[in-house]
Each structure stands twice: as structure tokens, then as C-alpha cells.
Amino acid sequence: MTLHERLYLGTSSWSSKDWEGVFYPEGTPPGDYLAYYATHYRTVEVDATFYRVPSVAMTRKWHKCLPEGFLLAAKFPQVITHEKGLVDCEADLKEFLAAMDQLQDNLGPLLLQFPYFNKASGMTLETFLENLGGFLPLLPSGHRFALEVRNKGWLKPALLDELRKHRVALTLIDHPWMPRVEEVLADLDPITSDFTYVRWLGDRHGIERRTKTWGEVILDRSREMDAWVPAIRSLLARRITVFGYFNNHYAGHAPGSIDLFERTWDSLPVSEEA
């Protein structure tokens, strides 16, 4: 089912063993997961790059098994976002980009994901913007970059203006700490580039109290999809490209969440489609 040519919908990671027999055919070798995944979806988000920079050999291997038109998004390493807070990390940035550039035309957006900065962290919005102002000019042209914050009080014009200056996309997330998408769109214009990045994260700790296996949907997210589908259609109507990724923690099984999105999309009247 093709939703929209400018809508790239996928999952956060492809490596879950719990998907065998549910999404992957039983007995599929893990080394074949990505190639199989790419026959079903047009994009995927890599979580493993958050923990360490992949080797050039690894990203070349990914590239070899991806079809034309498939886009692989990836998180920046935590050494840049969490440990160094964007300061004095030029060498880390260079190493990361050198590895990711091996994907060539399969390279999708690269995500700067930040934690919730509490008072004890010492990171205020003002300090964050100062660090951001020093870091964003280091990003090369010809790439797509997105940024995610988890402090709802940081969704301010000053942050959006800084991102627009460098054409970095603000990430829209479905997360207990953050406002709902319809609230964000009503309060401000979150579009800061020619694309936007969406992450359906859910309540990680809440769902892990119920399950730690990810082979089936256990939460009904129909109400949330009833809000997200019109929101995304409104962005597509503005000729914004949308990259969206479902986490297993959102409802229990990320491919099942994509199925729900598609059913919700299909159930809306054609006249509402972007």
C-alpha cells in the first residue's frame, strides 16, 4: 500500500528477534533481516549508532543490501549528544559522517536525540542554544539533519529559529513527556526544514511493566492515530516530506503500529487526503 510519495514510514531498528515468525519468516538469519525488511518498507531508523559509530565496513554492508530509493536514518552517537553536549566534538562528528556517507543514495536523515535535561543536569535552554549555535554550522550541506528534545518547555521560537537558520528539522514525538501533535500544531509552526521527522516512542517504562517481548501489539493506539494521520496529511499538503518511525515500545510491535497507521489512513475520506 502506497500512502504518499513524500511519506517515508518505518520502524526504529530492524533487528528484533521477536519479529521472527510474525514479520520475518521463521528461521530467517539475522544477517538477512535488513534485506527482507527493505522489501516491505521504504525506510528504517538505526538505533545502534547511538551507542557507537558503525565501522565503514558495516555501513557499506548495509548499502549493498538496500534497494534503490530506500532511506536509512540513524541517530548521532551519544558521545556527541549526551556526553559532550555538542561541545568539542568535531572529530566525533567527522568519524560518524564518514561512516554514514558510505550509504550514498540510501542515506536518510541523521537524528540528534537529546535526553530530558532536568535541573540537576545544569543544562538550561539558554546553554543548549549556545552549544547548538556553535555546533550546527559544522554540519555539512547535502545531508538531512533532525533534532529531538524531550523538554516541552523548550519548544520555543528561539529553538525553532536556530533550527530554521540551518534547515534542521524539529522532531515531533509521541511521548508521555511531550504535548500531543495537535497541540504542537495549534501552538506553533514546528516545521523548520523542507522535511519533518516523527518518532512514535510511547511509554517505555510503562509498557515494559507489561511485556518485554515485541511480537504482538498489546496497546490500542487508535485514538492517537486518529490525531496523527490528519496532522501528517496537513504537513504533506504543505509539500513537506515526512519521515516517521515506530518504536516497539509504542504499542508492543512496531510493524503492527504501521499496520494501524495504514488502516487509519485508508479509513479517512479521500477528500481529506493531502
Image (cartoon, rainbow, N blue to C red):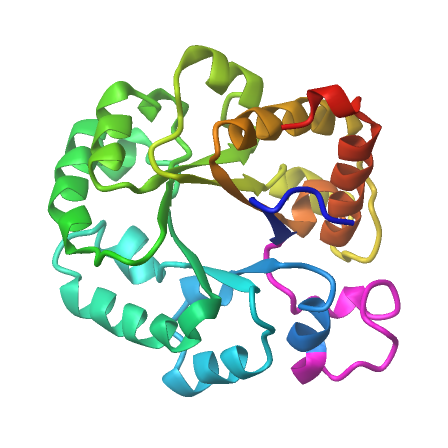
45 left or right of 246?
Answer: left
Q: In this view, does 257 lie above or below 172?
A: below
Depth check, front residue: 25 or 130? 25
Q: In this view, does 11 lie above or below 243?
A: below
Which is nearer the eye, 213 or 133?
A: 133
Residue 140 image offset from top left, x and y in percent: 21, 58
Q: Quadrant of residue 251?
A: top right
The residue positioned 45% from the left and 79% from the top of the image is 59
Q: Does the magenta stretch include residue 33?
A: no
Vertical relation: 264 (above or below) 157: below
Question: Residue 210 falls in which quadrant of the image?
Answer: top right
Q: Residue furthest front?
A: 271
Q: Which residue is drawn at 85% across and 82% down?
A: 27
Q: Give the range drawn in magenta.
A: 11-32
Q: Which residue is drawn at 29% across and 58% down?
A: 142
Residue 180 visible in this rendered orientation of the protein:
no
Give the number of marks: 0
Q: Where is residue 263 in the image (x, y as percent from the top left)?
A: 82, 37
Instruction: Residue 164 in the image: state x and y as whole percent.
Output: 26, 33
**Magenta stretch containing residue 16, yes or no?**
yes
Horizontal side of residue 115 vs 259, given as left or right: left
Quarter the C terminus occupies: top right
Q: Is the magenta stretch mostly helix, strand or loop?
A: loop
Let me know if residue 205 appears in the view. Answer: yes
- Give residue 126's position: percent from left, percent from top: 16, 28
- Pick whichever, 82 or 216, lies toward us: 216
Left or right, 161 with reference to 100: left
Q: Is residue 178 left or right of residue 265?
A: left
Asked if 44 appears above or below 153 in the picture, the reply is below
